[in-house]
Image: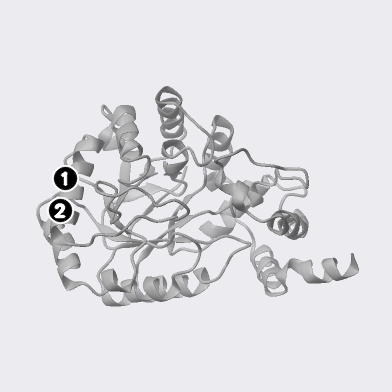
Amino acid sequence: MQHRTLPGTDITMSEVGFGVWTLATGWWGDNDDAEAIRLLHQALDAGITLYDTADSYGNGRGETILRDAFADRRDAVVYSTKVGYDWYNHTRPRGQRELPHDWSPEFVRNSCERSLERLGTDYIDVYQLHNPRMDAVGSDELFGTLDDLVSEGKLRSYGVALGPAIGWRDEGLAAMRRRSIDSLQMIHNILEQDPGTDLIAGARETETGLFVRVPHSSGMLEGKYTPQTTFPEGDRRRHRPRPWLIEGLQKIETLSFLTEDRPYTLGQAALKWLLATPEIVTTLPNIYGSEQIEEFAAAPDLPDLGDEDLQRIAELFAENFGVEQVAAEA
């Protein structure tokens, strides 16, 4: 495993991290606590040191399973968690993806204290605003509260996690340029490069460290889907339209050069493509089993992609991987 340091801090983390939402929410398969802890232990043994969660994942479960897994190894791990959704006083409305936000100093401070308790720690390494809009980015009161929590030793750093879906270019750029954030989390991968390219440029300009989630485009870049692939009830991928699967398979056919007579799986090559960007401090693949841990944790130690590989991917993206041409011929 290779490691990178979050700019402006002394926080060093593995180039492949573990997004705990897959274990905590049940949206990508179900794991009981014993299985979740087993996977977390396996991940740390494989060299993964960054664990990214949120207070709202599983109504706190995303934090408590980290406490239960690493209570005796806190110094060996880096915790990134998030704040903003008021799941304490609200339930998710039917048919809606998001809970109400609360960015008041009282709510943020109380949420921080509760996260510390659930994590079983007296400090959080990376604290991120969970999917903020411009009103949060523009709040001096909110960022003053975060600065106070850093001064009190409860936070080592803070940043912004963009979402819930891909996008949020303006919010991300504003947060990096107007606020002294250390990190920004975004969706970015070979198949979905907008607005990530602009956010990378912003991170380079402001010396902000990037966390990349969905690096495999919801599993497409793991190279295991077929036209017959279906997803179980409750799995978020089930809500993807059928053309997403078919067009995605057509796109990854054009990436076969990354794995032909190469030491990579497609999933590993997708991570190496991201890690070719120095502003990206860590990647957060969706880990839901032992196989993914072994495969993804091995990626940083593989040879880097060459300049010709990176250029070829850029050209493929610019022409939508030839999908329109393939569809027209069909």
Q: In the rendered image, which residue does mark 2 sit on?
A: 109
Residue 113 is labelled as: 1
* Lateral position of residue 227 relative to residue 217, left or right: right
In percent of the image, x 15 and y 69: which residue is there?
Answer: 141
In percent of the image, x 72 and y 48: which residue is there?
Answer: 262
Say which amino acid is labelled 2: Arg
**Position of residue 166 measured from the top left corner of the image (x, y, whole percent):** 51, 64
Q: Residues within 10 Å of mark 1 (few under 14, many from 20)?
A: some
Query: Where, by quadrant of the figure, is residue 66 drawn?
Result: top left
Is the C-beta separation of discs 2 and 1 under 8 Å? yes
Can see residue 133? yes
**Position of residue 301 measured from the top left corner of the image (x, y, whole percent):** 54, 45
Relative depth, front residue between 325 and 269: 325
In percent of the image, x 19 and y 44: which residue is there?
Answer: 123
* Lateral position of residue 71 relative to residue 152, left or right: right
- Figure quadrant of the C terminus: bottom right
Q: Residues within 10 Å of mark 2 (few under 14, many from 20)?
A: some
Kindly state the secondary structure of the residue where label 1 is placed: helix
In percent of the image, x 46 and y 63: which residue is there?
Answer: 278
**Position of residue 315 measured from the top left corner of the image (x, y, whole percent):** 70, 72
Say which amino acid is labelled 1: Glu
